Image (cartoon, rainbow, N blue to C red):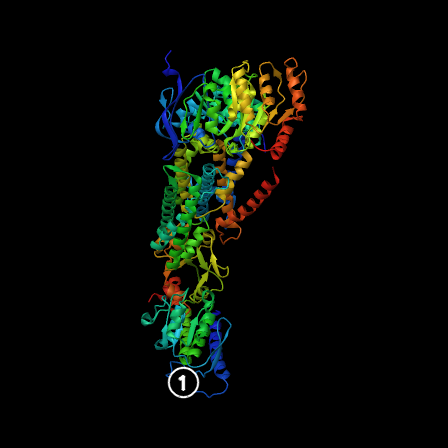
Amino acid sequence: MSAQLDHALVFDRASVGYGSRIVVAEASFVVRGGEFLGVVGPNGAGKSTLVRAVTGGADVLAGDITCDGLSVVGLDERERARRIGVVPQALAAPFGFTARAFVEMGRHAYLPRLGSPGPEDRAVVDEVMERTDTARLATQRTDELSGGDLQRLVLAQALAQQPRVLLLDEPTSHLDLNHTLQVLELVRALADEGMAVVGVFHDLGLAARYADRIAIVAEGHMSAPSAPHEALTGETIAGVFGVRSVVRTDPVTGTLAVTPLVRDEDLAVGLTRAPIGLVCGSGAGAALMRRLMRAGHPVEAGALNLGDVDQAVAAALGAQREDLPAFGDVGAHTETRVLAAYARCAAVVVCSTPFGRPNLPNLRAALGSGVPVVLVGRMDESRDFTGGAALALWTAAVSSGAVRVDTEDAAYDALRDILAGGEDR
Amino acid sequence: MHSPSSHPRDPRGHRPAIVLTVLVAALAVAGLAGVALGAVSIAPGDVAAAIARTFTGGERGLADAVVMDLRLPRVVLAALVGASLALAGALYQALFRNALADPYILGVSSGAGLGATLALALLGTSYAARSLGVTAGAFVGAGLTVLVVVRLASRAGRVDPNSLLLAGIAISYTLSALTSFVMVVDRESMQSIVYWMMGGLSGRSWEHVALAGAALTIGAILPMLGHRDLDLMLLGDERAGQLGVPVERLKTLMLASASLMVAGAVSVSGLIGFVGLMTPHMVRLVIGPHHRLLLPASALAGAVLLVVADLVARTVLAPVEVPVGIVTALAGGPFFVWLLKRSGSSR
Amino acid sequence: MKQWMVRLAGMAAGLALVLGLVAGCGGGGATPDDAGTDGASDVQATVYPVTITDDAGRAVTIAARPERIVSLTPGNTEIVCALGAIDRLVGVTTQCDYPADVTDITKIGDFASPNLEAVAAVDPDVVFVTTGVQADVIAQLEALGASVVAIDPQTLDGLYASIVTVGAVIDENGAAAGIVSSMQIQIEDIGERVESAPVTCFLEIAQNPLYTVGDGTLLDELIQYAGGENVVTEPGYVAYSVEQLLAADPEVYLATAGSMSDPSDLAGRPGYSELSAVANSRVYILDDNLVSRPGPRVVEGIRAIAEALHPDAFAE
């Protein structure tokens, strides 16, 4: 199979910008027919500029952009419109045109100078309006449509161009949940049918879910496209967006889900306050961990298994912890280290984590560390899978004066009291 | 607002044919009235006989002079000028994406005024000099002004509407000042120029008709051919380009066409206001924004409007003639008040 | 028919005005008049201070015999010179060109906007202005210390009265009376020559738009004295419709030189070829300065119009 023929859209070291100002330098990538490339990046990075450069809305200052081998820079507008369709971010509805007339404008590049739309053109318009669920709007005026309807209509207009390449600039920013899915499912289907699609996204999860590959535009450069799980890692996202987040595979969709936790700026306060230990796991400590670190307390998270939510959060936030393999036990050496770590803290909070034999040592280490303890919730059969050992430790801690609260939020308040009263270590 | 029929073949039904037929009929009626009525009353039979005599020959009398030498060229000229202004107005409204753009928006009026003033001041008092010289001067003035304004507003080969507006205003002020200066220096020309600027169709000859006709014919070709491109331009320059419209080339050609028509109109008739602004606006409200119908309908409506306005101008205070620009302005004021009320109450 | 009546009334009015001035002086005896002019037998010199009523209805008092006179209109300049006071004339407008000697006199601006500083610089005792466009400057001129007299006759009789007034102001009453009677005699002579029926005519004063003079204007009256009948009956200065002109079809077509330069031009204008005047080549151009300036030379203007209207009467 000749790869060249299928190069629907190629950026060949293309530097794009306006006038003499380069916005994105030397972007290089290939989008083949049937591929959906997602482009993400911070605001103002130049994602839109890249898209606009393909149709002349921005300047190509170096390199080349080609469609099926034909350079689109300086290409005759009519020829270009037959190959490349664009769905811009926001299009104002023109006064007085019906929806159907609006979509029919997409056929402009195919209509002869002196002719009218023929049966074939009408058929195309009918079909794209069916596919975009806009056929029922045909006789309504565009300036009376809702934002969602108008966005789909614009997509229909672009599809009426029967393009080889479809460029979408944040196509679902104005859409509700329902219409977002509708549009993206349709675009995905079009890609599957052979269209080359490039979509600019703000929502990383949507990008990861619908795009085959993802490229990141930031600080004047574009990364090479790669699979979502390779392109969107915690480190990359933190580096590009300045947000600590947890990136996991969403069990529901099977695609990447990005959960933003905290902005660097909010953490930049500096972790200068008293360290707090957390005994956590299974997501019980995530909120408290985030809250403490935002407030400036370094957190000791104990020993956590890879794959555990709290481990991911701790990793994302940069909290101190011992990483264990998934399903691994807390060994003796680990327990010693964890105990020592807890001992360095001003207080320890035992979150409402269930305990089993593997992670019981965390609890033991915390209670044995000698620092003030705050217990969250109750210890009963729903949490104790250690055959009573956890309950025993718990009871002992209570009688030693551990503070017991109902929720992690209450624990935060209790910590404040402890820190205010006690001496910092 | 009427909603078009949902017939898949022609969404607008038979409306285009009806509208155009009505307008053509209206123009015929207005034209006949214009030729039959005037300061001197001539029996319809005599009017018809006079028209017949142009073909059959025969001794000419008062009716022939009045009908063929005075009224007919005047009515034809009114139709041509009205059509030119309305068509140019529709074009400017498309290019500027603003339904309040009028044909004088690029300072054409002040350029024509200066050209006419200079011609009047420098040429003699012979009829040819006065009449045709002023026309030539106004035409050249108008043309040069548009070139200067477009040049000023161009940046890296692109022309944007805002720059055009600003350049037009700047040039307008400058040229108006120069015109006033010339009028002060050459006092005798002042009355003629002031009157000319009020817009009038009296004393025009078949030469004027030829000029206006040529300007309209040449100027109307490209817009009529490019009606779809004009529709797409309403989506914005960038979007139109994405859909295949050669935007910059189109703007240049349409501007040139519109300016040719306006220059032709202004040079023969002075500054007749409101026709270029009101007509496409009114027509658009009735038949919608598709230029395929809007352009010819505007032209026809403009022709009818001006023929009627001229008839009023020369009969309401007969034998004194009111400048036709005053009649159109008097009609224009209430029109805008009505527009204001309408837009305030609807939606 | 009525011309001789008008003439008589004119003479009577002129005489009455002069007698009235002299009688109204009060105090101070009559002084022998200076170098008499023809027909100025018992006109006396002005006794100062004298109060006259000008054409703006203002009562103006002239304190002493003016030695420094400024005229702001060509018509008034001609009147003052005709009265023999050119050596007392110290300021004229740029449009003043008759008699030839006035070109040496200091120019103080033009008719439509006189330069007040220049006027002040020549230090006038009296300034002759017109009403209308010059009405605004009257107050400013008085502030310079000069007496301001507005002269703006609308009729021939008014012109006679104006000449007499000017004569009273500058103490040239004899000359004034002489001029008036001379004018009347000449006009009467012209009138006798054109005793045949009045010839219909039209007078164009502007080409495009077509402007003409109607009832009540000085030009209209000149036409009547010249044996003409103006086809335009509307009052004042009129923007005229060519259609109406064609319907009226005057025998003679007149135009001022400022409006038309070449009579053959007329045939080229749309519709004009049907006019009898054009077909018979009865198109004449008049000197603006003779017909449009209210001054003694209107007589020449009347004569020019009469020659155009009744060429046979002046064939010798």
Residue C264 locus on image (x, y percent): 34, 54
The residue shown at (49%, 23%) is A234
Q: Is residue A7 left or right of residue A342?
A: left
Q: Nearer the viewer, residue A35 or C131?
A: A35
Q: Is residue A16 left or right of residue A424?
A: left
Question: Looking at the picture, which amino acid does disc 1 mark?
Answer: Asp
**Farthest top residue in view:** A1
Q: Is residue B256 left or right of residue A273?
A: left
**Count the marks: how many?**
1
**Quarter placement of the N terminus of chain B:** top right
**Quarter placement of the C terminus of chain B:** top right
In the image, residue B60 sits, relative to residue C184, either above or below, namely above
**Does the rendering let one see residue B248?**
yes
Q: Which residue is mark 1?
A: C33
Q: Chain of mark 1?
A: C
Residue B78 locus on image (x, y percent): 46, 43
Residue A357 locus on image (x, y percent): 60, 13
Q: Nearer the viewer, residue C149 or A331?
A: A331
